[in-house]
Amino acid sequence: MCYWYYAALRRYEAEMRFVATFEGEEWDYPTELVNGFTYPKMPIILDERPDVITSGTWGLIPSWAASQEPKEFLKKANTLNAMIETIEEKPSFKKYADNRCLILADSFQEWKHTTVGKKVVKTPYNISVPGDAPFAMAGIYSVINGVPTYSILTTQANELMADIHNSKKRMPVILSPEEEKLWLQRDKLEPYHNRTEVELVAVNLGEPEQNSLF
């Protein structure tokens, strides 16, 4: 799954890369590694306004849960991620399968699990695309009280990610620049199940971490 990522893009860089204009006055997104369980506001592009970069809250809230306290719902439902293979079936997601968004990122982080004796050691890796270029992850969204709330779509891991994220063997649906427009135009879901052709670069961040959310 994907619960940590960077979106440390500068406003000018993001606008040039995604051919879109930020709608606000100040670009004040987190520049550090973001933990999804803090439910942050992050830069996204919605299908309805493909030329605008807006803010979305990580963690999709369906309309039937709008009356609940958001963090309480998200703690129970954990809609930070959604499996692309089943979003048309799951109650929290099926209504929003055609609500498409781009989730802007610089990189994401996963942990490799290695058994050492009786302990499971978790080693963090930072994953990006070649050249450290900004990229988009495929997402779906729901608008609650005027604010988009979103989920990152995941799919079966490619060879690199299966080796790193070996506890779940999943990865975000990372879009090529050519796919981004098609995704926002509500392209069929099936072509995005297979990400074996997506080229990624992984960096071992050093000492294994004994504590993580995975």
Image (cartoon, rainbow, N blue to C red):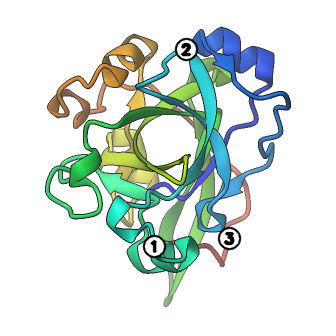
According to the picture, the residue beneath numbered tag 2 turns out to be 51
Q: Residue at 36% across / 46% down in the picture?
A: 153
According to the picture, the residue beneath numbered tag 1 turns out to be 67
- The vertical placement of 112 against 140, above or below, is below
**Nearer the viewer's eye, disc 2 or disc 1?**
1
According to the picture, the residue beneath numbered tag 3 turns out to be 209
- The vertical placement of 107 against 46, above or below, is below
> With 42 as the anchor, is 101 left or right in this view?
left
**Label number found at residue 167:** none
**Nearer the viewer's eye, disc 1 or disc 3?**
1
Amino acid type shown at disc 3: Glu
- Identify the image quadrant of the N terminus: bottom left
Amino acid type shown at disc 1: Ser
Q: Earlier in the sequence, mark 2 or mark 3?
A: 2
Residue 206, image quadrant: bottom right
> With 28 as the anchor, is 98 left or right in this view?
left
Q: Residue at 70% across / 24% down in the picture?
A: 23
**Nearer the viewer's eye, disc 2 or disc 3?**
2
- The vertical placement of 182 against 192, above or below, is above
Q: CA distance from mark 1 to mark 3?
A: 38 Å
Q: Earlier in the sequence, mark 1 or mark 3?
A: 1
Q: CA distance from mark 2 to mark 3?
A: 40 Å
Residues at circles 1 and 3 in contact by the CB criterion of under 8 Å: no
Residue 18, image quadrant: top right
